[in-house]
Image (cartoon, rainbow, N blue to C red):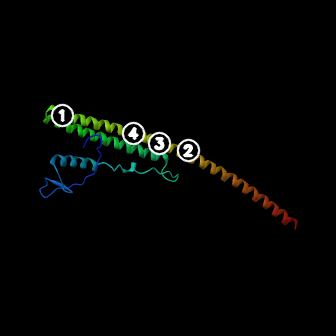
Amino acid sequence: MGANGSTTRNVSFGLDEDEKVTVVEGVKLSEHVLRRMRESQGSDSAKPPLSSLDKPPSQKPTGPSTTEIQEELRKDFERQQALVQEQLASLAQMERETAATTGLDELTPALMVEKGKVFEEQEKSKILAKQLERKEKELASISSFYKEQLEILEQKNFDNYKETTEQYNQAANKAEAHIRAH
């Protein structure tokens, strides 16, 4: 539960007959936990899924353009940042509510934990920003590579066309001269 090794886990839950205690694989959840889960479930249902960051961007020239991919990555990153900010705001609100009902001695460790979480989230957002920049540079280099390859192929195609046209004209002239001679 500490700030060092915590990870986000998805938990499914439901109400029992009394609608007070929820059992998830033999684990009973308190009302406070249920309230937090309901709040997070309500805020998550209004947002689109963020799974598109897990997918590697298409590197095929026939797929979406580089700018479209970059824009999609940027939008996903901004959505993630907004989600993190929203979660931090709700956690801060819960801490304020807790501070109003508890003494200062109990608040200090909670604030320290919260500051640790905030620092972790800031570091994570910095890492994601660097990853986004690296991906954008990679996409730009791939795009320029494919443009260069396309130009080379077009030039070869044009040269081949000119050569074939010349050969055809020479063969036609030769055949015409041969037919006239007879």
Disc 3 vs disc 1: which is toward the camera? Answer: 1
The answer to whether residue 151 is left or right of residue 45 is right
**Residue ID for mark 4:** 127
The answer to whether residue 2 is left or right of residue 130 is left
> Residue at the location (34% across, 41% down)?
81
Count of numbered circles on the image: 4
> What amino acid type should be assigned to the residue bearing mark 3?
Glu
Is mark 3 in CB contact (under 8 Å) with mark 1? no
> Residue at the location (67% across, 52% down)?
158
**Residue ID for mark 1:** 107
Is mark 1 in CB contact (under 8 Å) with mark 2? no
Residue 175 x %, y %: 81, 64
Is mark 2 in CB contact (under 8 Å) with mark 4? no
Disc 1 vs disc 2: which is toward the camera? Answer: 1
Q: Disc 1 and disc 4: Cα gap in Å?
A: 30 Å
Label 2 Cα crowd, 10 Å radius (few <14 / some 14-19 / many 20+): few
> Residue at the location (88% across, 65% down)?
181
**Residue ID for mark 2:** 144
Is mark 1 in CB contact (under 8 Å) with mark 4? no
Residue 171 x %, y %: 78, 61
User: Farthest right residue?
Assistant: 181
Is mark 3 in CB contact (under 8 Å) with mark 4? no
**Residue ID for mark 3:** 136
Residue 71, picture quadrant: top left
> What amino acid type should be assigned to the residue bearing mark 1?
Leu
92, above or below 30, in the image: above
Residue 6, picture quadrant: top left
Q: Disc 3 and disc 2: Cα gap in Å?
A: 12 Å
